[in-house]
Image (spheres, rainbow, N blue to C red):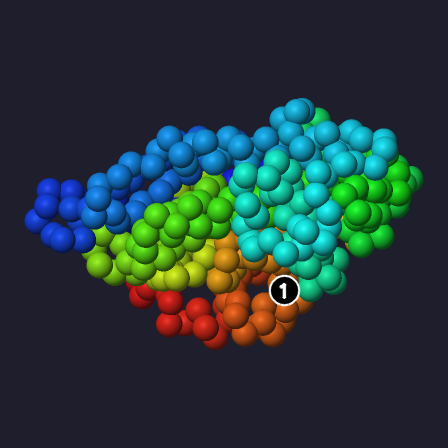
Amino acid sequence: MRTNFLLFCAFLALFGCRDGSNSHVATYIHLNGDAMGTTYHISYRDSLGRSFQAPVDSILEAFNKEVSTYDSSSVISRFNRSAEPFELGFTAEEASTWTIPAPGDRPGAHFVSNYFISLDYYHRSKGAFDPTVMPLVNYWGFGYQGEQAVEKVDSARVDSLLDLVGLDRVLALEGSRMTKISPAVQLDFNAIAPGYCVDLLGKFFEKRGIRNYLVEIGGEVLARGLNDKGEPWNIGINTPSPDAGPEDIKAVVRLKDRALATSGNYRKFYEVNGMKYAHTINPKTGYPEMSNLLSATILAPSCTEADAMATACMVMGLDQAFGFISSQSHLDGYFIFSRPDGSLDIRHTQGMEALLVAE
């Protein structure tokens, strides 16, 4: 699974002139900053000219306190260290009635909400999306314990860690407590949390009457309405190469009232003795997943779903991922893969055709 928030998408024509010569331009406000180990960019139209920088930063900070594995005091970190049943403060029945994203005024609500969503996507993807892969992520040197290459693979150790993987068999909610079969079981929501937080911020803007906005965190995007030119938002998909810069674009997508997320293995990997090890860990084999699929861009109604499905696709590989996304009428996908001669090729769902900007 993806274990960090790399920027796989680049923005085109996001920031326009604000000289008042155009009714769309005059009321757009742009925010940016650091979040979740990466950056965020927000653009929105508000006739009242309100800046929401402070509340946005506050939401991001509070969310990080629940799901960041890099914060030792976060809810998820305390759960990962726990040897006893973990007290949530509310029952599973109560949590199951929440809308998504969960209410921000309930401490621990986002942690539990991410669990419930993950459980759904775990079953839909037949285990390709599985946040209990955290112990394996750490073993392979891509987790919160620090990035380090595995010089010699211990297959017995990998097999033992696989016994801790499987969202529906290693965790259970009993009343207001979450239990696990072993204290060594750990969760990692890094493959869903950025998308979820994008949706959380989108909900924040909608509650304030904002109908035209774009929220991006580390390349995960939610677009509503129109941009400052009165057009759908143009989002670039990076060329999947370790040397590609933000402006090296393979395709441009027109995005309106949908979300987009991209996952890939071409930036986050290391090489030992001629073998490449990527940060997407297959929860079924326990080993890094390396295939000819270089990146998967998924369009969905919510960024939470787009984020999770992009990760699941990288685990599935090109053919299975394409078939899976094609079978979901509300999803679209754009897949970049390498041919045997090293050249790049693409495959996309039928619905993407009308959304791609002609070069």
- Percent x, y for residue 181? 88, 43
What residue is shown at x 66% (from left), y 50% (from top)?
95
The residue closer to the viewer here, 95 or 62, is: 95
- Image quadrant in which you'd find residue 78: top right
- Image quadrant in which you'd find residue 141: top right
- Percent x, y for residue 87? 76, 36
- Image quadrant in which you'd find residue 76: top right
**Residue that mark 1 sits on:** 321
What residue is shown at x 32% (from left), y 52% (from top)?
209
At mark 1, the secondary structure is helix
As drawn, 150 above or below 309: above
What residue is shown at x 37% (from left), y 31% (from top)?
54
As drawn, 8 above or below 352: above
Q: Amino acid at mark 1?
A: Ala
The residue closer to the viewer here, 52 or 188, is: 52
- Camera sees residue 272: no
- Camera sees residue 85: yes
- Percent x, y for residue 11? 35, 47
